[in-house]
Image (tube, rainbow, N blue to C red):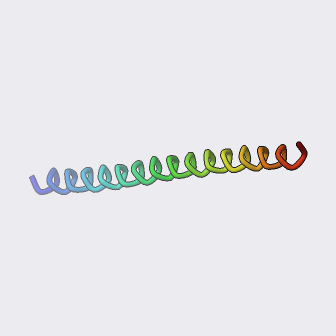
Amino acid sequence: MFLAGTLNQQASYYFKLLTMVLLCLSHWLKKSDLISSNMKEFHDESDDEDRAFSG
């Protein structure tokens, strides 16, 4: 009975740990997506400025 209890505790601990890692990973991926899209927008804007100067 005690052994089953500790195994269950370990399983829930690892499940929580895994959940935390997945949450952090998805958050980080969303963040990097935001950064890359912002960079793209920034580059697009600078292209427009270049065209304004040349035109």
Residue at x 16%, y 54% (from the top left corner): 3
Residue at x 50%, y 52% (from the top left corner): 28
Q: Which residue is farthest left?
A: 1
User: Quadrant of the rendered structure where residue 9 is?
Assistant: bottom left
Q: Which is nearer the eye, 23 or 3?
A: 23
Q: Which is nearer the eye, 12 or 39?
A: 39
Q: Which is nearer the eye, 48 or 17?
A: 48
In the drawing, does residue 41 fall left or right of residue 15? right
Residue at x 28%, y 56% (from the top left corner): 13
User: Quadrant of the rendered structure where residue 47 is?
Assistant: top right
Residue 15 x, y percent position in the rendering: 30, 49
Q: Which residue is farthest right?
A: 54
Residue 55 x, y percent position in the rendering: 88, 42
Residue at x 45%, y 47% (from the top left corner): 26
Q: Which residue is farthest front?
A: 55
Residue 6 x, y percent position in the rendering: 19, 57
Residue 4 x, y percent position in the rendering: 15, 50
Tell how many labels.
0
